[in-house]
Image (tube, grey):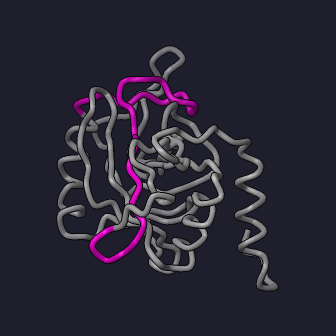
């Protein structure tokens, strides 16, 4: 049986230079950092093999190369990427040891503007993979099986995998990891400020 598999990581950018003016060709802010880590048991108790991620990243490169590797702010419980909630586009992906790295362009959409405001306010957010696949229990680990299909990477507030929070880097120094509840409250305040509250 295929399940919706969501894995979230703290995303600490190696380049998180919103405060220093790193922009895309279109003039949008750009950050980069770890999107996923292979061959570790994550906070959901799941394990992804390197071969599985290598295959999926190779397939995902088509979306990156066609400028359509978009993701949402917060995780929907669906396999559909809802364009009205898109906040960013991944423009580059590469490997660094066991880490899948990515360069992320923050888009000037309503959700992208929220993401940009959070990062500029030094709120730590997470990046989360969304995909479908089956699991096999191996002791205390749930091994993700070969039918896994990566859909996208979203930005969220709660981590499940070590090492993938996003925070602002100022003058080469990483920002400190913040309490997740602050990010959640900030997102909720922004989303609920127009009279209706979708969360």
Q: Toward the viewer: 70 or 151?
A: 70
Q: Toward the viewer: 77 or 10?
A: 10
Q: Position of residue 46 (x, y in %)?
A: 48, 30
Q: Toward the viewer: 57 or 97?
A: 97
- Whether the magenta-drawn stretch holds residue 42 is answered as yes
> Is 93 left, or right, of 115 in this rendering?
left
**Quadrant that contains the C terminus:** bottom right
**Figure quadrant of residue 88:** bottom left
Which residue is located at x 32 percent, y 39 percent?
Answer: 100
Q: Residue furthest right?
A: 195
Q: Toward the viewer: 167 or 82?
A: 167
Read off the magenta span. Answer: 24-51
Question: Number of marks in the image?
Answer: 0
Residue 76 sits above or below residue 43 on the image: below
> Is 41 left, or right, of 23 in this rendering?
right
Q: Position of residue 65 (x, y in %)?
A: 18, 63
Which residue is located at x 81 percent, y 85 percent?
Answer: 195
Which residue is located at x 32 percent, y 42 percent?
Answer: 101
Q: Position of residue 145 (x, y in %)?
A: 34, 34
- Whether the magenta-drawn stretch holds residue 124 is answered as no
Which residue is located at x 78 percent, y 58 percent?
Answer: 185
Q: Residue furthest top?
A: 139
Q: Residue furthest bottom?
A: 195
**Quadrant that contains the N terminus:** top left
């Amino acid at each position: 049986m295929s399940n919706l598999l969501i894995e979230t990581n703290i995303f600490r950018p190696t380049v998180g230079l919103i405060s220093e003016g790193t922009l895309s060709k279109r003039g949008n802010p750009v950050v980069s950092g770890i999107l996923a880590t292979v061959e570790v048991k994550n906070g959901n108790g799941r394990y992804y093999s390197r071969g599985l991620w290598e295959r999926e990243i190779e397939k995902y490169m088509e979306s990156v190369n066609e400028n359509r590797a978009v993701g949402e702010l917060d995780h929907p419980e669906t396999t559909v990427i809802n364009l009205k909630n898109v906040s960013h586009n991944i423009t580059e992906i590469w490997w660094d040891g066991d880490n899948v790295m990515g360069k992320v362009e923050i888009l000037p959409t309503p959700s992208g503007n929220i993401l940009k405001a959070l990062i500029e306010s030094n709120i730590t957010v997470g990046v989360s993979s969304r995909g479908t696949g089956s699991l096999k229990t191996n002791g205390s680990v749930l091994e993700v099986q070969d039918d896994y299909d990566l859909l996208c990477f979203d930005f969220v507030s709660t981590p499940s995998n070590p090492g993938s929070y996003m925070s602002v880097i100022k003058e080469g120094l990483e920002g400190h990891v913040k309490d997740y509840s602050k990010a959640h409250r900030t997102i909720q305040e922004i989303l609920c400020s127009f009279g209706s509250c979708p969360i």
